[in-house]
Image: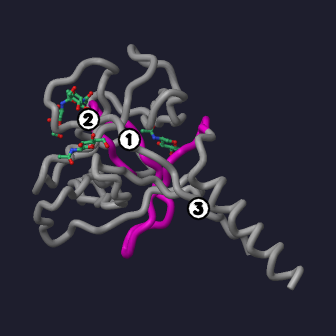
Amino acid sequence: MIFKVSLYAALLACIGTATSNQHMTDFKLYAYGSGLKPGLRLFYGDGLAYIGEKTPSFVTEAVNVTFSESVDGTEFVAKPDTSTAWDQELLYVVNSTDAFDSVGFATDGDNGTSSNTTSGFGLYGGWAFHQNGDGKIQMKFYATPTDDEDIYLVKWSAGGTQTSGDTPIALRTMAPTVITI
Ligand SMILES: *[C@@H]1O[C@H](CO)[C@@H](O)[C@H](O)[C@H]1NC(C)=O
Ligand SMILES: *[C@@H]1O[C@H](CO)[C@@H](O)[C@H](O)[C@H]1NC(C)=O
Ligand SMILES: *[C@@H]1O[C@H](CO)[C@@H](O)[C@H](O)[C@H]1NC(C)=O
Ligand SMILES: *[C@@H]1O[C@H](CO)[C@@H](O)[C@H](O)[C@H]1NC(C)=O
């Protein structure tokens, strides 16, 4: 009985941690999905989010980013790992009904369109999610192949149609394990 009670308490503690208002700082996002090299890192490429291990040939500015959860909200604040003209940008998804669009980076305050939202992001046990106004937690990230091998554009499916080649991915803070034998 005592065992049961403490197990229950431990479970509650776990759930509490995952959903509490603690703000995770300095994390990186890695993509995991079927058919993809495990743990491709998410980076910034000309304002859009890509995953891969090298700089794509087709972007002007590519830089790895490290994220922090905003203190007063539910934003993912991206800081470049090497110095760029910008200090920080916010991750956004296009969450208008039926959208299947690129995930990208927006300057705080520079809004453009109301269907790009920089709020609603969070981590659940190290898995990145986005939450709509209705409170539904979703993890609908996709990887779309580019012309460069092992480099993919990251997209968010708000209900839109995927084409063959688009692969569902999980974005996680966990780096891939390197096993040396
Ligand atoms: C990100 O860092 C990895 C190594 O940690 C490197 O291989 C890759 O080229 C970097 N990507 C960019 C866009 O700088
Ligand atoms: C909004 O999203 C669209 C589609 O991904 C993109 O073309 C546009 O640049 C974004 N606007 C802003 C202000 O980030
Ligand atoms: C733009 O403004 C709208 C309305 O205030 C807001 O819902 C949306 O999240 C904003 N988008 C960005 C990219 O800041
Ligand atoms: C998009 O996400 C934001 C942040 O969670 C939310 O306020 C907004 O209602 C969402 N838009 C739609 C069309 O669901």
Instruction: Label 2: state its secondary structure.
Output: loop
Residue annotated with mark 2? 59
Residue annotated with mark 3? 176
Q: Quadrant of the C terminus?
A: bottom right
Instruction: Label 1: state its secondary structure.
Output: loop
Disc 1 within 8 angstroms of ligand 1 (CB): yes
Q: Earlier in the sequence, mark 3 or mark 1?
A: 1
The image shows residue 15, relative to residue 75, as above or below, that is below
Residue 55 numbered tag: 1
Asked if labels 2 and 3 touch by Cβ distance under 8 angstroms, the answer is no
Q: Is residue 24 visible?
A: no
Asked if labels 2 and 1 touch by Cβ distance under 8 angstroms, the answer is yes
Q: Position of residue 126 (x, y in %)?
A: 56, 56
Residue at 38% from the left image edge and 41% from the top image edge: 55
Q: Earlier in the sequence, mark 3 or mark 2?
A: 2
For discs 3 and 2, the disc positioned in front in the rendered view: 3
Residue at 16% from the left image edge and 32% from the top image edge: 114
Q: Residues within 10 Å of mark 3 (few under 14, many from 20)?
A: some
Is 159 left or right of 25, judged from the image as shown?
left
Using the numbered discs, state the Cα–Cα distance from disc 1 to disc 2 in whole angstroms. 8 Å
Of residue 181 and residue 26, the one placed in the foreground of this image is: 26
Q: Amino acid at mark 1?
A: Thr
Using the numbered discs, state the Cα–Cα distance from disc 3 to disc 1 in whole angstroms. 19 Å
